Amino acid sequence: MFPLLGAIINGFFGAKADKRLITAVGVGTVAISFVLAVVAFCGLYVARAQGEENVRFVFHVYQWFSLQLPQGTVLPVNIRFSMDALSGLMALVVTGIGGLIHLYSVGYMHEDPSYSRFFAYLNLFTASMLILILASNLPLMFVGWEGVGLCSYLLIGFWFENPAYAAAGRKAFVVNRIGDFGVLLGMLILAGATGSFEFAQINAQASVLNAQFMFAGLSMSLATAACLFLFLGCAGKSAQLPLYVWLPDAMAGPTPVSALIHAATMVTAGVYLCCRLSPVFAMSEVAMATIAIVGTLTALLAASIALVQNELKKILAYSTVSQLGFMFAAVGMGAFAAGFFHVFTHAFFKACLFLGAGSVMHAVHAHGDADVRKLGGLKSVLPITWLTFLVSCLAIAGVPMFSGFFSKDEILLGATSNALHAHSAEMRAIAWFVFGGLTLSATMTAFYMFRLYFLTFHGSYRGHTAGDDHGYAEHPHEAPASMAFPLWVLGFGALAAGYLGLPHIVPFVGTHLPNWWGHWLAPVVYSHGSHDAMDAINLAAAAGIGAMLVGISIAAVMYRSGQPRPVEHPRALYRLLLDKWRVDELYQTIIVSPIKATALAVGRADFTFVDGLLTRLPAWKVRTFGSWLVRMQNGVVQWYGVVFLFGVVAIVSWITVPHASIEVQRFGARYVLKAEPGYGYQYRWDFNGDGEFDTTWQTSPTRIVGREESTAESAEFTVEVKNAFGIRAQARGSAETKVASAAGVHP
Amino acid sequence: MSVDANLVLGTVLFCIGIVGFVSRRNLLVQLMSIEIMLNAVNVIFVAFNRAHLGSFDGQVFAFFVIAIAAAEAAVGLALLIAFYRLYHHVESDEAKLLEK
């Protein structure tokens, strides 16, 4: 786990180390991991080529702990890594694109004082992501899941001196945590039902999960419950409705962070989870429908917000949310491989877009985010950035022959084949909704991406005419080589990666093409049956191409000149979109404010009651009592003498008055009478209750009396005590009472 | 029990000493009252010794008391002189620095 090593080294020693050493460790570890991933992937490929269907490399480290279930079964939780077709691909993406982004960060973060901390966090993130995808069981994957959530928090709030950025980091972590709760519950349901945490076992026993159970009057299958909980986790991690609110705020982090975490890797962890457990998800129609609907709605919502945003990275953030919605819609339609394909291509072009945005911001010396209304004309100044950015825009819009087209087409195909050929009417209706929604958001995607492109790169540079005093640099300059190289690679990937997943039937023509992607993933990922129906294929392709054409042409018509033209009618709709549908404000009123108010109220109650009762009340009591007592100290010596005298009188009286008490104990036929011993005391006993004392004065305080000497009924005894001064006292007691009181003092 | 006249003398002297200590402001008078109390105690010791002949514990202890009284008087006078140097009078009312 080389990146983990790099994180540790950089984290602990990096503060004082030379910059080149930090760079070497930070980037080198990821590069080594990439090489290893390639090697492992080749191994997998060779094994597949030789005919083995489902080949996996398994590396069992040790058994971490095990859970005892009440019925006596034991669930072991192992540290075990496995690499199969799905995780092999994902590992390549993570280490490869991650490595490129590490390289990019060398240039981007060059002047930052916390250079080493950045690389430590990046390495830690890469390590956590690798744990996530290479884990062979759910708990270990959850370790990685939490780890990337943590690193997301650390990296978003990297410049934490700015409280807004720190708040964004916190928001990301808290929202993510809500999802983690879902993952835990889903994980436990799965383990409880199938008896194992290992993915291989769970997938093999997926049919067990069809067992129904009753919950609050609704009958649902275990699979549905588990999948819905897991999807809650995915919604948190991968920014779906309603837990997407952290992603736009996460743009507060440095741009390489946005590229790595929020374009290529962490946000796709949710899709990875769905694909990993695809047999389980396929068991539950309700869950699949939910995922599809939520995905589509997210895609629509985010695309609509992105239409009117004015900040560069915000547009890209909403675009990410929207594309993630696409991926989940694909998953919901049963086209798991297509969703994952979109993960793959999206990683390339989105990372390229973010890095290009970073390059733009680096060029114009913008901090935080760049306002596109103040950019423009950068085509000639930043040629490399311009070209790669254009390629990625074409890819995301779905222009044919670029990678995004192929993956988007596969997703639409999944929707249309369900729409036209699904079994139940509800599935068909949902599929039509998904198809329509995805087409609409594809149109919007094409539109806003090209609006962004035109405003940034065409026209003339508007940076120096900024209204406030934060204008941008006068003469923007191109990026250094360390930043440019990743851009080239990613741009090429955005162009070419699509060819891995050519549709196996060309629309409108009907020839069959090799589809490497689906074939590769087939043993691992569930797929919904054949996609051979021509009508579905044609519809999907037509919709995809149509959406792209419409979107790009509208954008071109409006923004060709590169001048910002805000379209603010209708006014109310524009404001709604600009305010992000006021979802954040909604959450603020519904959730955050009540929690804060409750916390305040509870805090006040704690202060008043708990603190008051246990701390302040006793303290006040002690203080009052003390202040009353302190009047005894008035500094006047005579007063002290008087007190002294009182003490002397008390002691003397205690000494001169004898203390009489009697204790009677019974031992069978005898009584043992005991009185208090004292200096110079003499005792006289009366043990038959007649009022006359039966003994003479004796010096022993103990007297043993036989039964026959005392009266039978009352058994009452009296002792008289005389001290050296001749003062006497009496005490009376019987066998029932333990100690009797002194009575009668007379000289 | 008939009370020895010496005992009565000692007790009365002791009470005079106490009253003098408590009610007078002049430090010197307070010291003298303390001396009166100590001497009254001596008288009582010797009176008891006279009543219980056979050992002379009382007289020996009276010697102890005399020696201690001398030492205490020396210390007390030293304190009084220090006090006078500070306040230039010997009213014990004014020694209230330890008052809360």
Image (cartoon, grey):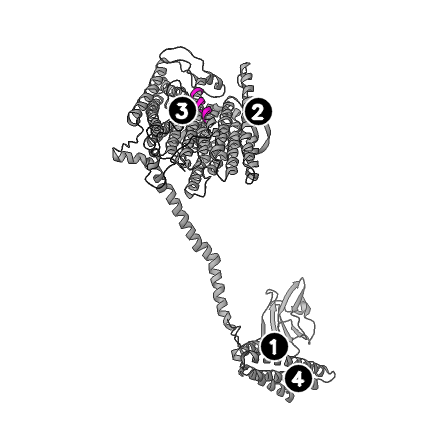
Which residues lie in the magenta part?
Answer: A487-496
Q: Residue at position x 70%, y 82% from top?
A: B63
Question: What is the C-alpha distance between the residues marked 1 and 2?
Answer: 92 Å
The amino acid on which the numbered mark 1 sits, given as a three-letter code, is: Val
The amino acid on which the numbered mark 3 sits, given as a three-letter code, is: Leu
Q: Which residue is mark 3?
A: A387
Badge nearest the viewer, 4 or 1: 4
The numbered disc on residue A58 is 2
Q: Which residue is mark 1?
A: A652
Location of residue A243 by image quarter: top left
The amino acid on which the numbered mark 2 sits, given as a three-letter code, is: Val
Question: What is the C-alpha distance between the residues marked 1 and 3?
Answer: 108 Å
Badge nearest the viewer, 3 or 2: 3
Coordinates of residue A316 in the picture (x, y in percent): 39, 31
Q: Is residue A211 visible?
A: no
Badge nearest the viewer, 1 or 2: 2
| Residue A201 in the figure: left or right of residue A302 | right
Work out which residue is located at the far right of the displayed protein and give it.
Answer: B54
Q: Residue at position x 66%, y 78% from top?
A: A724
A528 vs A83, nearest the viewer: A83
Location of residue A563 by image quarter: top left
Secondary structure at badge 1 equals helix
Q: Which residue is mark 4?
A: B42
Give the position of the N terminus of chain A as an image quadrant.
Answer: top right
Please tell me whether residue A236 belongs to the stretch shown in magenta: no
Confirm or deny contact between disc 4 and disc 2 (CB under 8 A): no
Q: Residues within 10 Å of mark 2 (few under 14, many from 20)?
A: some
